[in-house]
Amino acid sequence: MDKWYKKPLVIILFIIFLFPIGLFLMWRYTNWHRRLKIIVSVLAIFLSGYALGSVNTASTPTAVSEQVASIEVDNKAEQEEKEEAKEKEEKEAELKAEQEAHAEQKAKEEADRQAAEAKTKADQEAAAAAEQQRAQEQAAAVQAAAEQQRAQEQAAAAQQQQQQSSQNEAFVYFTPNGKSYHSRTTCPTLNHSSEILSGTLQEAINTGHADVCDVCW
């Protein structure tokens, strides 16, 4: 009795559902005509290929949709990455601009402060120089006034001394018993004098005639 897998019906079922095993059993254990075996083999392979193609065709829209969805996801992710990178660059550029503006403002404030300090210092130095010059001018004016006063006093003293010397050397008139000296012999107070003496003022003073005549002087 033949084994079960050698029976034609079993071989046909194997060809339908598991064609590789069915074809093997057909070529190994059946006494079918060679041409029939070739036709069955070709038909089985064709039907199997058609079935696989149908499966692939059925699965193709899903695969395409999945690929499209994957591409869209990738594009969306790439776009998001680009947008994030752009936003990051804009924030960095804005931060850099703010830092540069802050640095410029700080540098400007520092320059203004230094300029103000320099101006204040220059004004103080100019005021000090002006005050010193004014003090020097005042001191020079005081000194000049003092020198002028001293010169005037010296000139007045010299003039007084000269006048005194001139007066001492001046020729005057006086009487032997009188106490005054006169500038001229025609003085009315000398009309009754019988003797009129003459000499320098110093001589008149030395001889006791130190009073000046109120009439002829």
Image (spheres, rainbow, N blue to C red):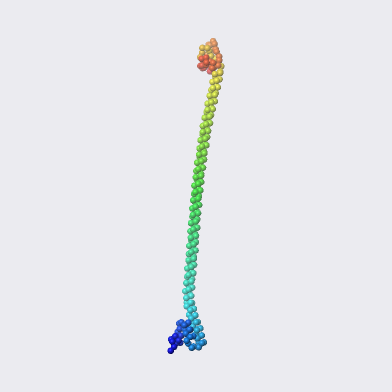
**Extreme-bottom residue of the structure:** 1
Q: Nearer the viewer, residue 44 or 67?
A: 44
Q: Can residue 81 be seen by looking at this rendering? A: yes
For the point 56% across and 20% down, the residue is: 166
Q: Quadrant of residue 161?
A: top right
Residue 216 lies, in percent from the top left, at: 53, 17
Q: Quadrant of residue 8?
A: bottom left
Residue 109 lies, in percent from the top left, at: 49, 49
For the point 50% across and 43% down, the residue is: 121
Residue 44 lies, in percent from the top left, at: 49, 83
Q: Nearer the viewer, residue 185 or 98?
A: 98
- Rendered position, 102 above or below 178: below
Q: Can residue 181 be seen by looking at this rendering? A: no
Quarter of the N terminus within the rendering = bottom left
For the point 50% across and 82% down, the residue is: 45
For the point 51% across and 16% down, the residue is: 210
Looking at the image, how many numbered discs can be counted on the residues?
A: 0
- Rendered position, 116 above or below 212: below
Residue 212 lies, in percent from the top left, at: 52, 17
- Rendered position, 130 above or below 88: above
Q: Nearer the viewer, residue 111 or 196?
A: 111
- Rendered position, 6 above or below 146: below
